[in-house]
């Protein structure tokens, strides 16, 4: 019986460009608008299969945002003003550090520390608790969550999110084979090149501050 070879893959297509007020840069920047289509490759033939997502990317800082950011009023408080990789990072950290449904003070400090190490911004204790509470209301796994949001992240954003996941796994002092496989699986869900995933795994043990509080 012949073997039918198939698989799904993302296909990023630029659909627009211009200038917008980047919420990360806090000034006017050029942007690229990208639509990430879902393609089914059947016996080597690409076939359209819906869409992963669509995002606006700042050409300067590389942050991505939902397309609604183009209507963002400067100074307004809106969820569309949050970089997608930071939104995803917060949820992944909450899913991984509070996997047992309970978040302890050490875990709060760990989440704050890792977010600042990767995103360069501080999370307040209240923001951490709000994220964990929201995660508990809509339980899912890290892999399933990333599969839903991968279409709103560019390569830079995917790498930042995976760095955060690797740092969570490193909180016990080292990355064992099982933990490395978890990170590699998340990299696969994000459709990151295997070489980039290996580079992140190799770099993180040197980038985590040894003064970071260990997870309980």
Image: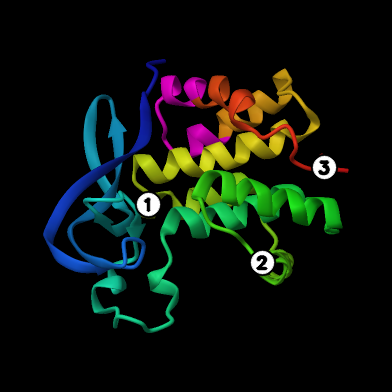
In this rendering, which labeled residue sits more in front, label 3 or label 1? 3
Q: Is residue 188 magenta?
A: yes
Crowding at dot 3, Cα within 10 Å, few <14 / some 14-19 / many 20+, comes out as: some
Kindly identify which residue carries mark 1. 151
Q: Is residue 73 magenta?
A: no
Kindly identify which residue carries mark 3. 215
Crowding at dot 2, Cα within 10 Å, few <14 / some 14-19 / many 20+, comes out as: few
Q: Foreground residue, 32 or 187?
A: 32
Q: Which mark is residue 33?
A: none
Mark 1 residue element: helix
Q: Foreground residue, 93 or 5?
A: 93
In this rendering, which labeled residue sits more in front, label 3 or label 2? 2
Q: Foreground residue, 9 or 162?
A: 162
Q: Position of residue 134 (x, y in %)?
A: 68, 70
Q: In which quarter of the view is residue 124 placed? A: bottom right
The reply to whether discs 1 and 2 touch (Cβ–Cβ < 8 Å) is: no
Pick whichever of labels 3 and 1 is earlier in the sequence.
1
Taking the view exactly as shown, the residue that stands out farthest to the front is 211
């Amino acid at each position: 019986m012949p073997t039918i070879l198939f698989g799904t893959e993302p296909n990023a297509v630029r659909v627009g460009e211009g200038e917008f007020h980047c919420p990360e840069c806090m000034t006017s920047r050029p942007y690229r608008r990208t639509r990430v289509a879902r393609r089914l490759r059947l016996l080597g033939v690409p076939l359209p299969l819906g869409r992963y997502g669509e995002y606006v990317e700042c050409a300067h800082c590389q942050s991505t945002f939902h397309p609604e950011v183009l209507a963002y009023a400067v100074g307004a408080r809106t969820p569309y003003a949050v970089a997608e990789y930071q939104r995803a990072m917060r949820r992944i950290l909450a899913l991984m550090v509070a996997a047992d449904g309970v978040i302890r003070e050490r875990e709060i400090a760990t989440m704050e520390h890792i977010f600042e190490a990767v995103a360069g911004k501080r999370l307040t204790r209240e923001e951490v608790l709000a994220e964990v509470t929201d995660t508990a209301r809509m339980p899912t796994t890290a892999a399933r969550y990333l599969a839903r949001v991968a279409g709103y992240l560019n390569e830079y954003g995917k790498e930042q999110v995976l760095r955060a996941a690797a740092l969570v796994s490193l909180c016990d002092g080292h990355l064992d084979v099982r933990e490395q496989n978890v990170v590699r699986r998340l990299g696969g869900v994000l459709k990151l090149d295997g070489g980039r995933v290996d580079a992140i795994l190799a770099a993180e043990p040197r980038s985590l501050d040894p003064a970071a509080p260990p997870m309980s």
